[in-house]
Image (cartoon, grey):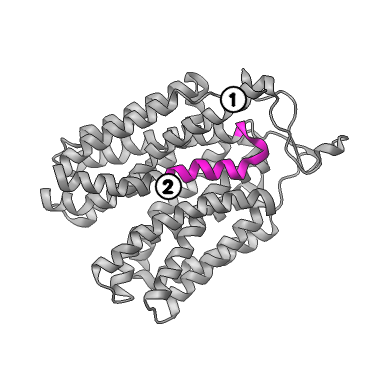
Amino acid sequence: MKSTTDRRWLIVLGTIIVQMGLGTIYTWSLFNQPLVELFHWKLNSVAITFSITSFALAFSTLFAGKLQDKWGLRRLIGCAGLVLGAGLILSSQVSSLWMLYILVGVVVGAADGTAYITSLSNLIKWFPERKGLISGISVGAYGTGSLLFKFINGSLIQSVGVSHAFFYWGLIVMILVVGGSFLVREVKMSQEPQTLDGSIQKDFTVKEMLKTKQAYLLFVIFFTACMSGLFLIGIVKDIGVRLVGLDIETASNAVALVAIFNTSGRIILGALSDKVGRLRVVSGALLVTAAAVTVLSFVQLNYVLFFTCVAGIAFCFGGNITIFPAIVADFFGLKNQIKNYGIIYQGFGIGAISGSFIATALGGFLPTFKLIAVLSIVSLLIAMTIKAPESGNTKTKEKRNHGKVRSLSPETRAS
């Protein structure tokens, strides 16, 4: 039993290393201006690279489960790490925007998403009794990678130039993801049915999940949470300059603030969801988001109000994207979690590109914030009323299991 417990925590360590390497793609904003200065491209044209990356990341999760079934988890993560690192290394040789879009946008995004969802879903299956906490640790490591590499990549760009920075970035990421994959071991699900809240839980297939209204309602909530957070991350410095009148250096501090509170929200709200209920935490996060964007829309902003609203949105965004893998497992079972969550996760990719298009269509930050506030209230009402789908469950006779998810057997974990 002790060796099994030790092995589980080695898998946690391996997943943390993998996720930290994957999270480094959120330092992309550091590369925008240096690439503009080097190649004389338009800033908007360079910045759209990250939207392509985010969309490719989300889209790749639709196929990650099938690839894992064919290749196995460790081999898949290792290959994704090689492709991710190679994509960044080759980006050091780009001389045109289309090459940048293909390498950093499509190749890096797809490799990142494949390793992200498979390593996260696997870790949740190893700890079914603590899904929120474990999801928080994994997704928190992703955010920590972004925070640490803001300094590493920033230093590389200044010391060796933006092109060579891609080379070293890719090499480091390749070592982290491939190295971490050697500590990861794929869980083998117990044939015994899982229980949740004293009921035997059905494992929904993707087709079965898509026949439920809950799948579409969860998608709406997740899309709203992702669009609000991702839109803010992309323009937070501009908001500080244009709406608050801050100088560029002070407004830039908001970028670091977003990273810190985003990571904190992942860990804190993930663990909290195990204790008070996931949908309660999501509801609270949506309420705070709605309040924050309403303040940004209608109140005369000062330094304190601006940073408070930014911190609140970032904290809630981090918490929501952490809790959702666990919610999908609670609603539709653990067995097919990676494939089911891959469907719901498309809300991330669509949310990543929707904010910019909506802002362009509506005419700027303020109308977009107002729309986000409305969507947040609608999603809040959904989160407060949604229930797990009926699956013909029967109450378990074992009172000791009431209110808990049956964890995997030690024999299964050790296999």
Q: Which residues are magenta?
A: 125-143
Q: Residue 130, how many percent across, how many down?
A: 64, 41
Name the disc covering residue 187, or none. Answer: 1
Asked if the residue at tag 1 contacts the one at tag 2, i.e. Cβ–Cβ closer than 8 Å, the answer is no
Q: Is residue 392 visible?
A: no
Position above or below: 317 against 303: above
Q: Say which element carries label 1.
A: loop
Residue at image coords 20%, 38%? 99
Circle 2: residue type:
Gly
**Number of other residues with Cα within 10 Å of mark 1, as a class: few under 14, some 14 to 19, many 20 or more:** some
Circle 1: residue type:
Val
Q: Residue furthest bottom?
A: 300
**Main SS type for the magenta part?**
helix
Whether residue 152 sits left or right of residue 406 in the image: it is left
Position above or below: 373 against 32: below
Residue at image coords 65%, 25%? 189
